[in-house]
Image (cartoon, coloured by chain):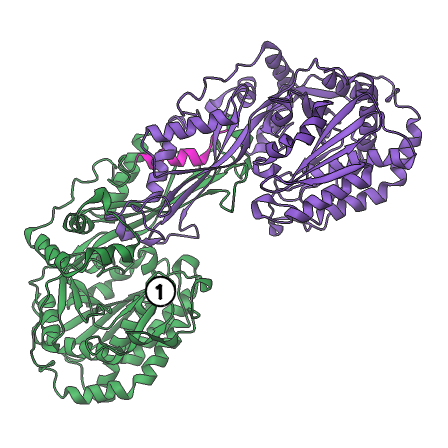
Chain colours: A purple, B green
Amino acid sequence: MIKNRLKLGCALLVLLAGPAAAETPKRDELKAAVAASHDKTVKALQDWIKLPTIAAEGLNVDKGADYMRQLALDAGFQKAKVVASGGVPGVFATLDAGAPVTLGVYFMYDVKQFDPAEWTSPPLEAKLVDRPGEGLVMMGRGVVNQKGPEMAFLAALKAFKATGRKLPVNLVLVAEGEEEIASPNFPTVVADPEVTAALKKTAGVFIPTASQTNAGTAGITLGAKGSVEFQLIVGGETSDKYPKADIHSSNHARIESPAWRLVKALDTLVADDGHTPAIDGWFENVKPLTARQKELITIGVKSRAEADVKKELGIGRWIDNEDFQTSSERFLSQPTVNIQGLVSGYTGPGGKTVLPGRAEAKLEFRLVPDMTRAEAETKLKAHLAKRGFDDVKVNVSGGYGPNQTDENTAFIQAQKRTLDKAGIPYTLTPRNAGSWPGVVFNGKPLNLPAGQFGVGRGGGAHAPDEWFLIKSSNPKVAGLDDATMLYVDLLYEIAATGGKK
Amino acid sequence: MIKNRLKLGCALLVLLAGPAAAETPKRDELKAAVAASHDKTVKALQDWIKLPTIAAEGLNVDKGADYMRQLALDAGFQKAKVVASGGVPGVFATLDAGAPVTLGVYFMYDVKQFDPAEWTSPPLEAKLVDRPGEGLVMMGRGVVNQKGPEMAFLAALKAFKATGRKLPVNLVLVAEGEEEIASPNFPTVVADPEVTAALKKTAGVFIPTASQTNAGTAGITLGAKGSVEFQLIVGGETSDKYPKADIHSSNHARIESPAWRLVKALDTLVADDGHTPAIDGWFENVKPLTARQKELITIGVKSRAEADVKKELGIGRWIDNEDFQTSSERFLSQPTVNIQGLVSGYTGPGGKTVLPGRAEAKLEFRLVPDMTRAEAETKLKAHLAKRGFDDVKVNVSGGYGPNQTDENTAFIQAQKRTLDKAGIPYTLTPRNAGSWPGVVFNGKPLNLPAGQFGVGRGGGAHAPDEWFLIKSSNPKVAGLDDATMLYVDLLYEIAATGGKK
């Protein structure tokens, strides 16, 4: 789900010519270790990509979890175990450095589905290819979302190991294998008493990410929308009004159609404008943007050419033909009810005279503060029940609420300082319009700062030809080793100040 | 499209113990010729099935037409030619026997799509398999819809050839290869001046069919609903409001969704009950059933167990929980707007967080007298335009209006007499709820009687394991050779009385 974070580029552009990470002691020694391990790290990333875990397909579920556990142990975590979740298992690992401060890290070890036919390089071969204007990149499913950045973080830990140095902070790692299906069981993993107890001691939790634009600007994101994935299903399986299988279409003259029933149910969920959610009470807990959030959006809007953004998205107009500022505020502030997919009856070329036996809409909510997942699910079901849609099955397959972290927390301040000291410009985005399950850390009962952090660069998440920069040809953009070193720097910054929440 | 003709079984059951086809001279001689050619006919049918023409897939288009032309010549037509149609070509053939009466025959040489994985016997191998309680059947795509019955008719003509006998009637054959996509170009074939001129001389036009139930009851059907197939398409190709391809779903907060737009357009086409067409002016030309039509329906309703029909269709209830009579009247009298299929965005297992770049509904109208195809298309477009859906593309891919022939025409009387004399009980169905393009003959300018005729038995049209009875184990049901002989008898009946329109 973590994608398009920086599509808007809402930004507080900070340009500092400060010394590179002055506070990381003997930085060169660690840097040399990172460089010496470069080929090994690349190979380790390639091996990981060759084992895709895909929750939607039940692919490499147990193998993927065990592999994740082993990666943690190899990087220096003293304890690592697979945690049953009821679905794809989680992984919990700890590294005790005897430090006063503990940092939480969140990993996803699953990847999005893919169709090899759409790729120019086989998605599981993780080949190194030249990308003009960028450098040498690895191409493979999951390489930027999220295995590449995660491997960079693990490489940072290995550099400590290689130089016989203790980490400046203790670490708690929690990983899941269902991020791409909206983390249906991740709350269970985190609710494990041992995991909860460990996380409680952390200064905050972050997921490694490759946030740099091609101009070298990194990003700090202060929150994310929540996401709930669900399906509406109508057919012979939900009522004996409908046929159990597709039958000859002439029968619609005397038999109800699940496809029409689905259309009628769907129609009630958004207003006639085709985008405003119309579920009863949907906006009750929607918080308006703060003045500061709007200010950050304005800075972001000014930093990007609207035409480029539209071109990248393949559109000519925003909703209601709004201007870039209005549309950008809408992007970050509005909850959505989106149709991911529609499937019913005959879906091949041309037509086929059937009355479908089943109709399914794959839907998704994006939630903004202070909406919650439970609220969304309850309101949807009440809305449909009130209108008599008792033959429409609601299957909530995953989801979580939004998260939001204050930019003044020590945790975010440490991230800012890390970038400042490295001389890397960055944007401050008030909220990710996409989603990640940070609410598991950010919400009750943990109430921890949570975010995404990292430099380096990649693209094509959820799409063909996903890529991650290994050796950058642009001095402003970090390759794998520089991205690794920034995590080293972050650990020292967190150690210095991150203890305060 | 020709399917489910007898699902309702509206019936005037006629049981006569008259002599078998007394008026066919030297019937035994022809019967012996049919029997002697049995193996050849079976082989010819198998060979035809091995060459499936599928218009929706552009499969074996020219080959199929040429094959059809050759089949006609082999059966004794003196002239046969392929007629360009703008789509899959038609075939026009004539057999001049110097007779005073001319009979029109309509063939379809195309078949429905198929998925071999769903079949127990390979759909193109046309194997002979035992079907318990029925006899030896051929299993293959198109074998009952419509190649088997058509081959039986051709075998009847070959029996005349084999015995050196002249046909008692002249024949005009018009065949098409787009029946399964609602005959978009068949009117063009029939409008060819040479074809029109030839058809004008006919007493009526029929398509061979295998109409017997497992109790041996045959059927005469007096009409059929019309059918118009069309697609509604919304997406990057119809407006720059929508993305050109699937993009990350977070963007729905600022970009319109083609899927929602399609839902909103669809929602206006049927009432909230999920089945009553709501297109402006839709019922203006819908004729109510006549007293005689209702009477025929009542007879049909009484002749079948409602529970069996429901079981066969896989449902527990008719629309609005109506009784069998009411539901059967609805079945034959009501026009429909049916969704054949819905396709948008992600259609695989689970979910995928995309905002679709395209949404398509595959739809179909069934039209009753006196609606016309042109009326349906015009009213649909006006309805959508009035509501501002100018970004919803309407693609009409095929269709034609309804047909209805009076049971008192000489043409239908000849059919009745043929069955009466053969001692075969039959039902008289006022209208087929399914469709065939009989309106091309039945409507202006030809105004010919049109119908389906034939005995024999089969099933699985448009479905896996389509079958056609070759050797019947039930003396009441005709196998291939008896079905062939009934066409011989029909030709003599038409010769005797069919000249009067």
The quadrant in which residue A440 appears is top right
Callout 1: few (<14), some (14-19), or many (20+) C-alpha neighbours within 10 Å?
many
Q: Chain of mark 1?
A: B
Residue shown at 52% from the left, 24% from the top = A372
Give the quadrant of the C terminus of chain B. bottom left
What is the total number of numbered labels drawn onto the structure image?
A: 1
Residue shown at 15% from the left, 86% from the top = B27
Point out residue B272 in the picture as x, y percentages from the top left corner. Answer: 28, 34
Question: Residue A472, can we see it?
Answer: no
Residue shown at 75% from the left, 15% from the top = A500
Residue in the foreground of this view, choosing between A283 and B417: A283
User: Taking A260 as reference, is A339 left or right?
Assistant: right
Q: Is residue B380 above or below residue B27?
A: above
Q: Is residue A133 magenta?
A: no
Point out residue B41 in the picture as x, y percentages from the top left corner. Answer: 32, 81
User: Taking B7 as reference, is A310 left or right?
Assistant: right
Q: Main secondary structure of the magenta part?
A: helix
User: Taking A248 as reference, is A454 left or right?
Assistant: right
Question: Residue B420, can we see it?
Answer: yes
Q: Is residue B255 magenta?
A: yes
Point out residue B491 in the picture as x, y percentages from the top left corner. Answer: 15, 76
The quadrant in which residue B490 appears is bottom left
Residue kind at label 1, given as amino acid type: Asp
Residue in the foreground of this view, choosing between A471 and A489: A489
User: Taking B378 as reference, is A501 left or right?
Assistant: right
Give the quadrant of the N terminus of chain B. bottom left
The residue wearing badge 1 is: B110
Badge 1 element = loop
Point out residue A164 in the picture as x, y percentages from the top left corner. Answer: 92, 34
Residue in the foreground of this view, choosing between A255 and A462: A255
Q: Which residues are magenta?
A: B254-268
Q: Is residue B480 above or below residue A365?
A: below
